[in-house]
Amino acid sequence: MVSASKKALLLGKVLGLASEEDYRPSSASIAERAEFRLRKLHSQHQLNLETIFKLALTYTPTDVTGEDLDPDWSYQFFQMAEQINSRRMQDLWARILASEIVKPGNFSLRTLATLKQLTQREAHILEKALGMSVKLNHESRYKLLSGYRIHGGIKQYFRKSTLMNFGLSKYGLPYSSILTLIDAGILHSSEFETGTLDKGVKIQLNMIDNKIAIEPNSNNLLFSYYRFTPIGDELSQLVHPKVDSAFVKDLTALLSRDFKVES
């Protein structure tokens, strides 16, 4: 274990205060230390860009015609990408670059600005959320279902609660994580509800690696869900989450109380 004090001292390398070959900060003027720090920073930025570029080459197909990037978009992209230091996040930026070369316009500058501010922890939360999200029938956008409720009908009088919560926190997505995605501009701040679902009409829940077909047992059911923002929709193209098998199993069991379920 490294003490907090030693961790703090390690920051000296970033600030140009650590000795290196042919450089002694104690004998350098403040202007020389600033110049040294900027050289180090520019070198790191160049390394970041080269790493992202090399990764992008591995994602760019050889059998598809490429397109010219919008010059303003590419300028902003490289201005932001040079500051991405972690390999995991560099991989996301590389995939964006490769995608834009194939089909420009998939990722807006607003999405790039959001991604630039995204930490590895927040990216992990997004992966977790997408692993629990579904596309209903032929919809193209993911919904993070939080539960369903009974709206009207005689059943509501024989239940302790008319709201069935999917308990996302049990599977690693507590409400604090949802708030994190809201603050990052990835989820809308309010929960939404579907319209009342039609009895006996099949609905397909399309997850990353699973499909669950359900039919409502009554005309009094509706889903509650969190909606991804346009930025969240764009970022979802980059993430390759894994579905939690325990979540899928428990979700299927919970739905079977008020739906006919096929999985």
Image (cartoon, rainbow, N blue to C red):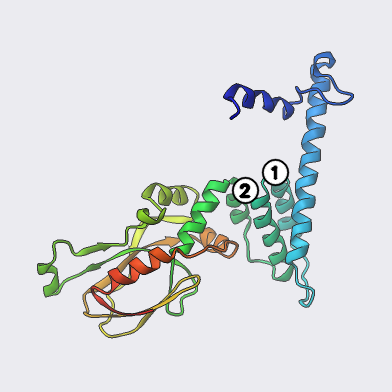
**Point 79% across, 18% down: residue:** 30
Secondary structure of the residue carrying numbered label 1: loop
Label drawn at residue 220:
none
Q: CA distance from mark 1 to mark 2?
A: 8 Å
Mark 1 and mark 2 residues within 8 Å of each other at the beta carbon:
yes
Q: Quadrant of the N terminus?
A: top right
The amino acid at mark 2 is Lys
**Point 23% across, 80% down: residue:** 217
What residue occupies the far top of the structure in this picture?
Answer: 27
Foreground of the two, 153 or 124: 124
Q: Earlier in the sequence, mark 1 or mark 2?
A: 1
- Left or right: residue 227 compared with residue 260: right
135 in relation to 238, above or below: below
The amino acid at mark 1 is Gln
Rendered location of residue 76, percent (x, y): 71, 51
Label drawn at residue 116:
2
**Point 17% across, 61% down: residue:** 161
41 in relation to 24, above or below: below
Q: How many marks?
A: 2
Foreground of the two, 184 or 72: 184
**Point 76% across, 23% down: residue:** 18
What residue occupies the far front of the structure in this picture?
Answer: 1
Which class describes the residues within 10 Å of circle 2: few (<14), some (14-19), or many (20+)? some
Secondary structure of the residue carrying numbered label 2: helix
Foreground of the two, 2 or 31: 2
User: Pointer 1: what residue?
Assistant: 83
What residue occupies the far right of the structure in this picture?
Answer: 22
